[in-house]
Image (cartoon, grey):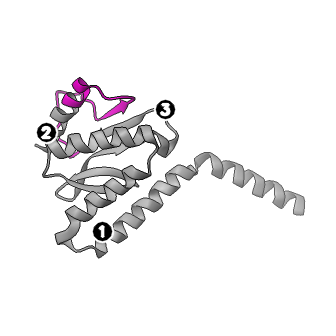
Amino acid sequence: MATNQKSTKATAAKSDSSVAFSAEERAAMKDHAAELKRAARRDPRAARADGEADVLAKLAEMTDSDRAMGERIHAIVTANAPELMPKLWYGMPSYAKDGKVLCFFQCAQKFNARYATFGFNDIATLDDGNVWPTAFALTELTAADEARLGELVKKAAG
C-alpha cells in the first residue's frame, strides 16, 4: 500500500508541474498582489509621484540592456502621453489611463526571454481594421523605432 501511495504522489507531482505556473510567473503574481496592497494604502494625491518613483526604482534594478531599453520606453511614453499614470504592473513598468493599464514594458530578464516587450492592453485605441499589433519585441531602438512607438502611444492614449 505504501508503494501505491508513493506512485500516486509521484504521478500527482508530475502532472501538477506540467500545468503549474513557472517560478517567474508566481513571482509576477506576488509582485502584483503587493502592488495592489501598496496602491490601496497610498494617498491618491501622491499617486503620480509614487508611481514614477516605483517605475524608476524598478528600472534601476534591471540588467544594463533591459534598463537602457526601459528608460527609453519610459521617456517615449512620458513625452508622448504625459497624462498617463506610471505604475508597476506585475512587477514591470506600466502606464495607466483612468486606473487601467494602457501600455507596459516587460524586460527580457523577467521571463528569461530573448527580447524585451512593449505592449498595449485592450483599452488602447489602436484599432485598425480587423487585425493590428498589440505588442512589440524589442532588441534595440533606433530613432525611427522611437518615433513609431511615440505615435502609437499618442494614438493609444487617445
Quickly name the residue at label 2.
154
- Sooner in the amino-acid sequence: mark 2 or mark 3: 3
Identify the magenta region.
Answer: 121-147
Amino acid on which the number 3 mark rests in the picture: Arg
In the picture, measured across the screen, residue 81 lies left or right of residue 40, that is left
Where does the image place residue 16, in percent across and percent down from the top left? 64, 52
Where does the image place residue 5, in percent across and percent down from the top left? 82, 61
Residues tagged 1 and 3 counted as in contact (Cβ below 8 A): no
Report helix, strand or loop for mark 1: helix
Q: Is residue 149 magenta?
A: no
Quickly name the residue at label 1.
39
In the picture, measured across the screen, residue 139 lies left or right of residue 119, that is right
Q: Residue at x 44, y 52 (%)?
A: 61
- Sooner in the amino-acid sequence: mark 1 or mark 3: 1
In the picture, measured across the screen, residue 27 lies left or right of residue 157, that is right
Q: Residue at x 39, y 43 (%)?
A: 67
Quickly name the residue at label 3.
114
